[in-house]
Image (cartoon, grey):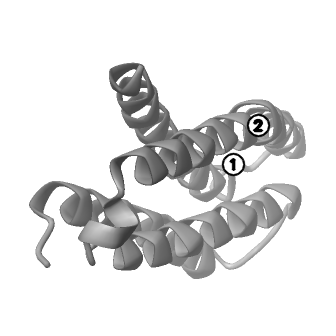
Amino acid sequence: MKNFFLTLHMISMCLVVGTLFLQSLTVVFRLRLKAAEEREGLRKTQKRIHKFIYYPILGVTILSGIYLAVTTGVFDESKWIYPKLGLLLVLIALGFQNGVQINKDMLPKKYAMMVHIAIFLIGGGMIYFATVKPF
């Protein structure tokens, strides 16, 4: 049963980071579109993906991660889990920020790129802590 949750967690974690990364990238691309109809069509697609794919997968990732952490005793044995959880909170906040950016039609491109780059760096940091376990 633990292997099932481990596989589920790893797949859902990849989907969360990948979906969020692509969603933030499409926000940047949407800013380059000239026609209002094209921007609105892409925005509607982004809203559906964010609402019906990102949030449910995020829920699966959090629940499976909690199950794995509790059953393996990682909170008692490992200190690397706490920085990873901190990065998870930042990633969730960036996900909500990405949702705000999706709803806005115009925003500064630099601001959209900062969120996009931060998602990439935070995702990389989470992978580092989970694989290397530095402390």
Residue 74 in the image: above or below residue 83: above
Please say if the residues under marks 2 and 1 sit with CB atoms less than 8 Å apart.
Answer: yes
Q: Crowdedness of circle 2 by 10 Å Cα count: few (<14), some, many (20+)?
A: some
- Residue 51, numbered circle: none
Under mark 1, the amino acid is Leu
Left or right: 15, with 6 as reference point: right
SS type, badge 2: helix
* Disc 2/disc 1 C-alpha distance (Å): 10 Å
Q: Residue at x 86, y 64 (%)?
A: 104
Residue density around tag 1, few if under 14, some if 14–19, many if 20 or more, within 10 Å? few
Name the spot of residue 56 as percent of width and height, x first: 73, 35
Residue sitting at 86 percent across and 36 percent down? Answer: 44
Question: In the rendered image, which quarter contains the N terminus?
Answer: top left
Q: Quadrant of the C terminus?
A: bottom left
Q: Amino acid at mark 2?
A: Leu
- Can residue 22 be seen here? no
Relative to 104, residue 48 above or below = above
The picture places residue 114, in percent across and down from the top left corner, at 50, 77
Q: Which mark is residue 42?
A: 2
- When the figure is inspected, residue 132 is found, relative to residue 55, above or below; the finding is below
Q: Is residue 50 left or right of residue 69?
A: right
Query: Which element type, helix, strand or loop, lies under badge 1?
Result: loop
Along the viewing direction, whichever of 131 and 32 lies nearer the viewer: 131
Report the residue marked by disc 1. Answer: 33
Query: Where is residue 65 shown, x and y percent of the image?
Result: 49, 47
Side (left or right) of 106 relative to 29: right
Residue at 62% over, 36% down: 60
| Of pointers 2 and 1, the one earlier in the residue sequence | 1
Q: Residue at x 46, y 64 (%)?
A: 119
Front residue of 106/57: it is 57
